[in-house]
Image: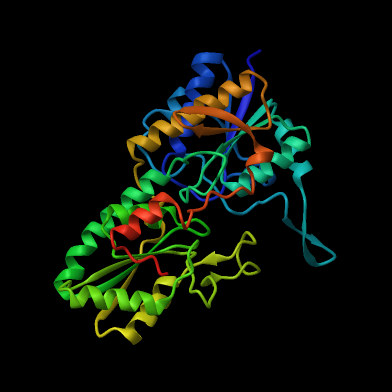
Amino acid sequence: MAKTIAILTGGGDCPGLNAVIRGVVRSAIKTYGFRVLGIEDGFDGLLNGPRVRELDLAAVRGVLQLGGTLLGTSNRGNPLSYPVQENGQTVFRDVSQQVVDNFRALGAEALVAVGGDGTLKIAQRLHELGLQVVGVPKTIDNDLRATDVTFGYNTAVSVVTEALDRLHTTAESHQRVMVVEVMGRDAGWIALESGLAGGADVILLPEIPYDIEKICAAIQRRRAGGSRFSIVVVAEGAFARDGQQVLQVSADQSCCGVPRLGGIAHAVADQLTHCLDMEVRTVVLGHVQRGGSPTPFDRILGTRFGVKAVDLIAEGRYGQMVALRGREVLATPIAEAVGQLNLVDPDGDMVRAAEKLGIMLGR
């Protein structure tokens, strides 16, 4: 009887997820003769349901170029801290064993868990409980140290760069300062690379607390030199030297126990308005960075990750996560990957290059 494996996507969506699913399904069926099940809406599909469907070759036909995930995903349903009712009160319990039991009831032998640091932490816990699991890293922030790059990041940088190209013309026409907020909770890679590619004048990163007076002075020097406008790119996790990250929703109010960032663009714009004799406008790109068709790079990387995940299952190498190292897709222990952030080096080559171009990084 053919081996049955399952796949789920957890956390936020990003371009390239369908490429991973397609890579898993096609490789599993065509190379190994496996049967593949798709678990819907992340781990919530195992805790409440189960919500599962079989994935054959027809199910993944035509999905390579599509954004999002055909299986659905969710930030809810974290089995490590799951809300349950006890004596009329809501308490949070570790229900990981229930996930393992529900998974085994499906008749599947191994799980491919696709997600970011939170999903991978759950995958590691399930592995410790005896579940045969392989991880696939996913985050548009590119903030996982165990892999050189994650799929979805390239698409996000491309989307932001195109937006900056468009904003240049309207900013110059109206002699405005445009403050553009992009994703990046702890790592400022999207802001840094899109800012470089899109010709930003100021780039603010979580790794470099900014000094608003120095930013104002830099914009004033630009205007004195004949520049009629300025473009400021700010990562959502950036903060002032004497401040802290701006929260849209606090951790205790969010659905998943993680604070939701948002509002730094407006905070920076308010500060700039007080020191500049220029009109300042804000643009928050938000979820447009997550949506839409993935770039060729992300389609290929997602596909390679999916194929490698199936190889690891066929080889019985569980508790591993696929990762890009140089030009090769390799395996690394999930336990060594979780919690290890890939941050921008404030003194690294890319930051130094930006500053040598005259880009203000807030310091």
Q: Does 207 sit left or right of 299 as displayed?
A: right
Q: Does 327 sit left or right of 110 as displayed?
A: left
Residue 205: horizontal and vertical position, in percent? 44, 62
Could you tell me which residue is drawn at 61 percent across and 40 percent down? Answer: 51
Q: Quadrant of residue 298?
A: top left
Could you tell me which residue is drawn at 17 percent across and 64 percent down? Answer: 169
Could you tell me which residue is drawn at 29 percent across and 65 percent down? Answer: 201
Could you tell me which residue is drawn at 44 percent across and 36 percent down? Answer: 18
In the image, 76 versus 325, the foreground residue is: 325
Residue 134: horizontal and vertical position, in percent? 63, 32
Residue 149: horizontal and vertical position, in percent? 47, 40
Residue 120: horizontal and vertical position, in percent? 63, 43
In the image, 189 versus 72, the foreground residue is: 189
Q: Quadrant of residue 175?
A: bottom left
Examine the rendering and report whether any part of residue 39 can be seen. Answer: no
On screen, residue 252 above or below 94:
below
On screen, residue 65 above or below 200:
above
Q: Does 42 sit left or right of 284 as displayed?
A: right
Which quadrant, please, contains the N terminus? top right
On screen, residue 298 above or below 223:
above
On screen, residue 154 above or below 91:
above
Examine the rendering and report whether any part of residue 306 can be seen. Answer: yes
